[in-house]
Every structure is written in structure tokens, then in C-alpha cells.
Image (tube, rainbow, N blue to C red):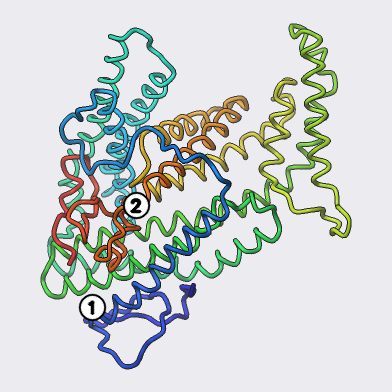
Amino acid sequence: MLLVGPTLPVMTINTGTAVAAAAVPRAGPQDETSDTALVLPLVALGAAGVLTGYGCLRRARRARARTAPAGGPAPPSYGPAPRAGLDRQARDRLVAADDCVRTSREELAFAAAEFDAEAVEPYARAVRQAETELAAAFALRRRYDHGVPADPAARRQALAGMVGRCEEAGRLLDAVADGFDELRGLDRGADALGAALEPVEARFRELAARTPTTQARLAALAARYAPTATEHTAGHVEQAKDRLVFAALRLNQGRQASDSGRVSAAVAHLRAAEGAVAQAAVFLDGVDRLAAVLDEAAALVPAALTGAEAERAGAADRLPDVPPGEVRARLLHADAVLASVRGELAPGPGDAATGRPYEPVDLLRRIVRAAAPLALGRTGVLSAAALLTARCATDAAAGFVTTHRGAVGAAPRTLLAEARRLLASPAPADHLRADELAREALAAAEQAVRAHGNPYAEADTRVSGTAGAVLGGILLPVGLPTGVPPAFGGPATRTRRTASAA
């Protein structure tokens, strides 16, 4: 797989504007304004990126069951109530509302790069309000999944409440969609489109320049730590390259459409490119964030061990209400875990003084969980370790759902929403639970993607990288082969960019 970098060749469009693209071999002279000349090399590189990325992920991750969680792929809009009943309707509305909020937040970030904070604030406020409604809907769903309330009539009311919260979130976004379009002014013509394309292209070039560095960083992490430490980011760089190739194609087509006066098509291409660039950033940021977390965790492990030993000392005196047999069992368990951690840190025969490769976040998680029954919270280092592990797990799950939301249903998203809520709590016990729920959310989302497969990988959609874009929710699976890029707004407005991207 060839790297995308700042020194690679650029592709030019008929305005003379250069957009950095992935390096591809050229087969001789060609017309640089030709769509065919641009698409063919991008297709080859994009297909390679998809295959390599998903191949790495499948090889790196542990074998898990292939049962998909409840939910299913997000519909492009709310639409009529599904026949499966109010429960299925509530799950579908949660997924659709979550997608609306995510898309609106992403496009808002590009508008913020163009306009001042005061101009953007009304739309940022609408997104925050929609997020609040959505969080309440997910909280209702979480309680419902745990059998609360138990009364059948009350459960129907709870489902109706979820639907109502989702509808309110969508209404808040729909209400400001026209104003948001007026702010961006994308439909005014070439000048406005050019101004909107520039920050996207700048962000594209920035991410392309970061890709080789991030790839080298991931390789260094794989060499330093155990394979499980980086398993969930194993294919991130390749998938980032795939998104960047897709973005390059759509940016080029957007410039061409704008120059030829096809404003609606140009806006559709722009929105698709923005979505792809945003997801490429999620992939690369995930690797860089993991590198920082692993280094922080590795430095924290020795102090966490000391903290756990301090928790152990005098534990029996601090647990007067716990039966002596149970206290002894907790102490024996803590001793076994801490001894196991020390063994993994100790150098083996022929190893360097730093010891064998290990996964520092997992070691912290084991230390914290072993100390928790001995009154977790007395030692500040263990509280910090609990927060770090929870943050790492939540970030991993959030990144996966964001970049695969075309195939992730309501169940993983509900778990993730609860993990985020608990992560904001100051209580270490909540952080332990957030870590557990986030890892459960990631596993469920991965199962959903495996079960979903790639139903859009026909020959015509591979030409423009549509298959990967649909899986990531960059394009809605309507109007294929080009698809429809979702826009800022709720269910009534998010599909307004329906002009053909051809």
C-alpha cells in the first residue's frame, strides 16, 4: 500500500487548483482534466486500502461470536413506523437521530472553519440541544433494556418517550437547517463553493501529510507492546487512506461540477468529501491518541501496583460488614492478580531489562479491578488508572461507531451512550462500569459490522469508493451508485443534497 504524503504527486483539475492525492503509478501521458484518468488509479489504490485495512483488522482481532446485536443499519430518515412494532420503531429512531446528530456535528466543524464563532453559535446550540434530547432517549432505552419499567403499559410509554425524544432532537436540527444553508451559502455559485472547498482541501492535505507519521507510530507501538494493545487500530491507517482517496475524487469532481455550473452536484460532492475527510481524521486521531494513552498507562503501572498494595494493607479493618471468608477471598484474588502483573512486567530469559511486551492498559484494568473490592478510591493513583482505562475504551468504541455507523444498530450505541454518561462521573466505580460498557459496545459494534458485510460492493459502486462510504455513513444507500451525502439537519432535511454526484 502506497503512502499518502506531502511529497506525493498532486492531481489537478480544470481550474488549475491542485489537490494532494495518493501516489499512483502513471502509465504514460494523460489529460489531467479527464475523469477517467483520475478515477482509474484512485480505484486501484482505494480498493487496495479497503482490502488491506479490513484484512488487518480481521487478522488482529480475537475471534468472537458472529451474532449481530439488535438494531440494524440506520435508515436515511425516520419514515413511517416499522411493522415490527413500537420497540423496533424506537430502536430505528435512536439510530437515525444519532446519525443526524453526528452528521450535523461534523458539517458544523467545517462551517466553523469558515465563519466566526458568533455566526456559528445558533447552530452549535441546536446541536447541543439535540444531543441532550438524544442522551435522554438513550437513557430511557438503557433502563428499558434492563426491564425498567416492568409494567407493560409503562413500557409502551417508555418506548413512546424514546420516539418522542428522538423526534424532538430531529426537530431541533430541522428547524435551523435552512439558516445553516444560508450561512454556508453553498447554493450561491462558484465563489461560495470555492470558499467552502478550500478548508476541506487544506484539511485533506494536513491529514495526507500525517499519514506516514501515524503509520510509523502504529508500527512502533506494535513493536513495543503486546499485539492486543493495538488490535483495534491495526487497520486504521489503511482505512484513513481509503477515506482520503474517496475524498480526493469527490473534491476533484466538486471543482469540476462547480466550474461547469452544476451547483447542486458540486455541493453533493463537497458534502461527501467533508464526510470522508472527517472520518479519515477519526482513524488517524485514534492511533495518535492510543499512542499517548499507552505511554501514560505504562508509566502509571508501577504506581498503580504500589497503590493496590496500599489498598490491600488493612483491608480487613475497613470492611467490618463483610464476612471474614469473603474478605479472605478478596485478598487472595488481589494477591493472585498483582503477582500475575508483576510476572508480566519481569524480564524473561534473553529479554531486555524493560521486560517482555505487554499491554499497559490491560494491566491497569486488572490492577484496578483487583483492588476495587478492597475499597477502591482511597488511593488517588487507582482512581486515575480507572479513569484512564475507561477513557481509552470509550474512545475506541466511539471511533468505531462513528466510522462504521452505516452498519451499527441501536444496541451498541446505547451501551456507548451509557459509558459516556458514566465517564463524566467523578466516581471511580462509575469509571469501572464505563470501561466495561464501552468494551461491550465495541464488541457488539464489531459483530454488527461483520454480520452486515458489504452489500454495496457491486462493480459500479466500487468505481467511486461508494461501498466504504456507505458503510461509514458518509453516503446514504439511496440513489446508488453515487449515493446521497447526508447534510446538517434532522430527518426532514438531512437528505436534501440529492443531486446526482455523477
Residue 124 lies left or right of residue 357; in this view the side is: left
Q: Is residue 23 above or below residue 331?
A: below
Residue 116 showing in the rendered view: no
Looking at the rendered structure, the secondary structure element under dot 1 is helix
Q: Quadrant of the C terminus?
A: bottom left
Q: Which residue is mark 1?
A: 35
Q: Camera-side residue: 302 or 46?
A: 46
Image point (73%, 49%), residue name: 358
Residues at marks 2 and 1, CA–CA distance in whole angstroms: 24 Å
Q: Residue at 46% of width from left, 38% of height from top?
A: 444
Which residue in the protein does label 2 denote? 471
Q: Position of residue 403 (x, y in %)?
A: 40, 51
From the viewer's perspective, is residue 449 above or below residue 374? Answer: below
In front of the other: 189 or 288: 288
Q: Position of residue 49 (x, y in %)?
A: 44, 66
Q: Residue pushed farthest right?
A: 349
* Image depth: mark 2 or mark 1 in front: 2
- Is residue 380 toward the left or the right of residue 422 in the image? right
Above or below: residue 57 compared with residue 95: below
At x 49%, y 42%, the residue is: 397
Q: In the drawing, what numbered circle is on residue 490?
A: none
Q: Residue furthest bottom?
A: 29
Measuring from the top left, give residue 65's x and y in whole percent: 50, 39
What count of labels does the image hold? 2
Mark found first going from the N terminus, 2 or 1: 1
Q: Identify the image quadrant of residue 80.
A: top left
Residue 251 image offset from top left, x and y in percent: 28, 69
